[in-house]
Image (cartoon, coloured by chain):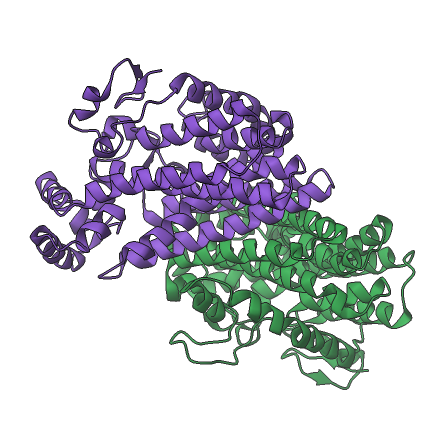
Chain colours: A green, B purple
């Protein structure tokens, strides 16, 4: 049993390691020891099983959408040459396969669900990157930067449609149920992005509103991933709902960590700019938690942010690094970082509790537990 | 029996009326007499039955997407005040209801299909207007002009997801079959838009490529509309496929007329700018047909277009009206207008032939025939 360090590689070690600087979730996970062998194997299996079907699905797209999608997934570079770029963690396909196993079926039963969920996830990345003006993802230029906004819109649409196509291909009752759940999750995903955008223009967002937005934006699709395989395997709604609940809280834990990485993450590891979320004036969890604190740093932060809000996006993005560092320090001082770390742990606990009543093979439960642990300690 | 004139109002009259200037399809439809009472009643019924469910569906969207969608549908104005704007012809919902009747069911059986197809159609309008930079639709500013590009993307996505949600709500085998057909149509819709965009950058597009693109972009969803009600009513695949074939060719007839209106349409009637498709350098049917002609005007047109292609979009859009008039005259002279008129008639004939083997109530067949006639003579 080893612990993942800041670069994602395994290190032997006990709780002392968790004290080092730069680990965004250090304060709350001093007891977490992750079985990274199991998690790496799980993610690797997800990629290995899902990638051929994902590539075959993408190959159905009319040119040039097939090429644009292949660039997005990291299979080719901007010039169209084969590439072995980082295609993301592929947590969702791994979960969908494990989900089928949770219902006693072989992992392959969850395959159409794994591919469909991954397609919906990437549809949302393509559109969100454009809407948010994000220029980098996974250390590479985003699709709209390389291929233009129209292709980002179009290929996003195509991946969304493809997800339903793949899932509905077998004309079974289970396929219909799975598509219904995926559609519900996709609607929540879109609601979440709408909330995210509207919060950026508001002076004040509550912690509850932020959690609702993150539940929609991240929780819903992870919830779908971890139940869709079971649904395809014929599991009843009670089992599927319990798995969904695990996935939803796993998503909230994941997002809390993402919010920490969005401010204090290592750009080398995350592939994003320094202070990424601060540059975008995102009302992420550490920010809203800090602003709701009685600490004097909260008032200073609120004053700075009120002034920031009057600036143009371009003017704000060109801030000196020190300006962002000041804001990050105030968020930390007001307790926003600590609260978010603890929130990640609370969601982790709730996620695991949701699994308790579900009857499933022991090795599946172990892997779902290891994955929840991994999500909380990840650095990218 | 009356004939629709250029503003869409009914006029008594014989073939002499069709000789007037400004009617883009005059040359080919001298024998067409449309039962506009039947078509108006059909479209009106479609709107009356589908609008409450459509409004209820849109009301599910999280703010501000519900408001943005309501603006798009013409239910409110840009300031949020109730409005009675033109929400489009609503041909697709009318077809979906008629489709249920074709299978011997009451029109209401097709209602979820009518709403789903209309949602997908409007998803594509929202995204296409943004990708194409179209500033006006139905005499009003487009959503991206009023609410910004992010809302146009987001609300388009939401309408797409909502379409599947509505259709899959009853957990029936028919709902699954209908969603499978809608998904296939949506994928073609997206393929068609991809082809449309890529053709704009190419020197030469063949008539066949243009027809394929238009079949994807317009034919596929009309085909889905006219079969989805029958599918929901439990019709077999043979019947659904025959109805699809009618709808596909109806769509190609519709699009041929659209291409004529896109160059020679009356801006007062269409709600678009003069020479709308020429301004966008669209390789529409009249253009590609003209370019493939041996007439000397084709060579002059090709020379002008080669020079046009070197200009920036802004530079080109600011052309003097006379420049567009010259190009339109050359297209006409080379036979592009005549060929497209005849193509509309050919597709009209093929559409009606597809219905022949289908056993359906006589009044349904009459209405499908009247609708096909209407599509070919419409002026907006």
Q: Quadrant of residue B125?
A: top left
Residue A164 shows in the view: yes
Question: Which quarter of the rendered picture does the C terminus of chain A lie within?
Answer: bottom right
Q: Image quadrant for the N terminus of chain A?
A: bottom right
Q: Residue furthest bottom?
A: A12
- Residue A100 is left or right of residue B28, and the answer is right
Image coords of residue A196 (percent x, y): 56, 48
Give the vertical position of A1 relative to B336 (above or below): below
Report x, y in % for residue B221: 48, 43
Q: Is residue A70 above or below residue B308?
A: below
Image spot of residue B333 (x, y percent): 11, 44
- In the picture, measured across the screen, residue B170 lies left or right of residue A322, that is right
Q: Residue furthest front?
A: B357
Is residue A201 at least partly visible in the picture? no
Name the residue located 47 percent from the left edge and 58 percent from the top edge.
A155
Residue A79: give x, y in percent of width and height.
38, 76
Which of the 4 quarters of the picture holds residue A347? Answer: bottom right
Pick the residue in front: A263 or B360.
B360
Q: Where is B158 relative to A63, above or below?
A: above
Q: Is residue A200 left or right of residue A109?
A: left
């Amino acid at each position: 049993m080893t612990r993942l360090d800041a670069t994602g590689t395994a290190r032997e070690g006990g709780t002392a390691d968790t004290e080092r600087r730069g680990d965004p979730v250090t304060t709350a996970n001093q007891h977490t020891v992750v079985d990274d062998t199991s998690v790496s194997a799980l993610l690797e299996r997800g990629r290995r099983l899902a990638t051929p079907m994902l590539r075959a699905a993408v190959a159905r797209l009319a040119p040039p959408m097939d090429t644009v999608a292949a660039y997005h997934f990291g299979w080719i570079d901007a010039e169209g040459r084969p590439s072995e770029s980082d295609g993301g963690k592929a947590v969702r396909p791994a979960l969908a396969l494990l989900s089928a196993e949770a219902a006693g079926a072989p992992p392959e039963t969850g395959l159409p669900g794994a591919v469909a969920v991954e397609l919906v996830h990437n549809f949302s990345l393509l559109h969100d990157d454009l809407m948010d003006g994000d220029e980098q993802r996974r250390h590479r230029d985003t699709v709209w930067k390389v291929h233009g906004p129209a292709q980002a819109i179009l290929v996003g649409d195509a991946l969304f449609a493809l997800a339903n196509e793949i899932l509905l291909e077998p004309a079974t009752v289970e396929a219909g149920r799975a598509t219904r759940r995926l559609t519900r999750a996709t609607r929540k995903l879109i609601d979440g992005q709408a909330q995210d955008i509207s919060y950026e223009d508001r002076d004040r967002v509550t912690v509850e509103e932020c959690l609702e937005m993150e539940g929609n934006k991240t929780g819903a699709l992870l919830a779908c991933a971890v139940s869709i395989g079971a649904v395809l395997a014929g599991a009843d709604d009670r089992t599927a709902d319990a798995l969904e609940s695990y996935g939803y809280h796993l998503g909230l834990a994941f997002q809390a960590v993402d919010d920490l990485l969005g401010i204090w993450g290592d750009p080398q590891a995350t592939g994003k700019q320094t202070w990424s979320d601060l540059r975008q004036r995102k009302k992420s969890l550490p920010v809203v938690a800090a602003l709701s604190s009685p600490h004097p740093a909260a008032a200073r932060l609120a004053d700075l942010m009120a002034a920031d809000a009057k600036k143009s996006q371009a003017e704000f993005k060109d801030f000196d690094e020190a300006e962002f560092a000041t804001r990050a320090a105030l968020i930390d001082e007001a307790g926003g970082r600590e609260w978010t770390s603890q929130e990640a742990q609370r969601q982790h606990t709730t996620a695991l509790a949701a699994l308790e009543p579900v009857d499933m093979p022991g090795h599946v439960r172990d892997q779902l537990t290891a994955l929840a642990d991994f999500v909380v300690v990840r650095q990218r």
